[in-house]
Image: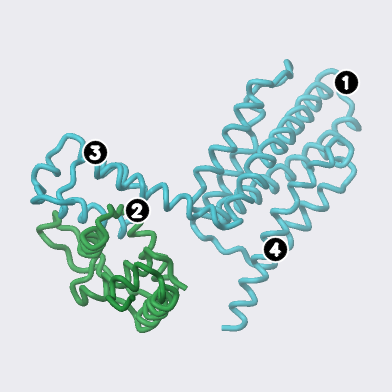
Amino acid sequence: MLGEFEYLLITAAAGLGGKAYSVAIRKEIEVTTGRRCSIGALYTTIDRLETKGLLKTWMSDATPQRGGRAKRMVRVTPKGVQAAKDFYDAVTRVSRGASWAVNRTGGGS
Amino acid sequence: MGGEPDRGRVMTSARWPLVEAAARLLERHEREAVLGDLLETGEGAWQGLLEVLGLVVRRQLSHWKNWQPWLAVFGLALPGSLVLMAVSVSVSSVYERLINDRILIGSSHATHDGFLQLLCRGLLLVGCSWACGFVMGSLSRRTLWVSIASSCFACLFCLVRFGEPSLSRLCLFIFLVPAIWGVRQALRLIRITLASAIVLAIAITALMILPPNSRGLWTLNWSLVWPAWYIVATAQRSARKVGRN
């Protein structure tokens, strides 16, 4: 089972598709959660997920806007998609009947 | 992260070299990506430095989730250095006695025994130090600096407490030469064949048991034997892997 931050990272990377790389993922996580995401947390989590086979990373060509330095590109693997789906299903199931979840969907009495 | 990135300002900041220096503690690819990220987002140099150091600390801590760095520090660097310093002093005192015997007594029988003792202890010191260094280097490549710092701490401790007036303090550190050689060979990923590993382990064990050594050395010195047998075990594992492939 994924951790919360791992899920956020996989979801952000999946949403960015072919444009998923460290800075874009970090920005996406910070904008959606409103929380600061450190480079340390991001890179160590990317490594962990790659070791588990949930992500694939590679270095892109160097770009001038990064001072001639390469980007670390990220792609979610099918295994990663399945793990994120399992996490989402588990959260949805466990949230069923919770007051905040009921109010949000508007299905409460 | 918010605001327009100002790469030029970040790169020309007087503190940027600090960020680059800290990033040297990361692996090459990661350093490249992290510095690029910092330039792209235009974060201030101090913030960048904190980000890089945060990643370095996380990377270092992650190595300690394995047992190997712990064994390298607490099973080799600290106790190994202490015992090897004792063996170094022992070799030096045998040498000194031998020299004194030759000058004062001139007896060939006494010098013959002395030579044998010196040879056995010297070989034991070289073999054990090399094996300890080699195992320390292969166990903890990425945390080697902690093992080296622990070894330096042990050396400093003994240097301060050294109280043998007839011997130079430098004799404590004879073991460092073969130990550093062992570490260097481990870092160069030198592969030890099973046959040479067995020869080394048997030689060290035999030298530990033989009378010229067993008299003067402590039972604690047995802690120096395991690295040689560890090399045998790893050489055997590599040989099996090669056989399977």
Left or right? Give the position of B68 relative to A49: right
> Which three-letter amino acid code belongs to the residue tagged 1?
Ile
| Residue hosting label 1 | B105
Residue most extreme to the front: A109
> What x and y, as percent, mark residue B216?
86, 35
Q: Earlier in the sequence, mark 3 or mark 1?
A: 3
Residue drawn at point x = 89 percent, y = 26 percent: B107
Q: Nearer the viewer, mark 4 or mark 1?
A: 4
The dot on residue A40 is 2
| Residue hosting label 3 | B46
Q: Nearer the viewer, residue B214 or B145?
A: B145
| Residue hosting label 4 | B232
Q: Nearer the viewer, residue B15 or B116?
A: B15
Q: Relative to residue A50, is residue B122 depicted above or below? A: above
| Secondary structure state at the residue bearing disc 2 | helix
Q: Residues within 10 Å of mark 3 (few under 14, many from 20)?
A: some
Residue drawn at point x = 31 percent, y = 58 percent: B30
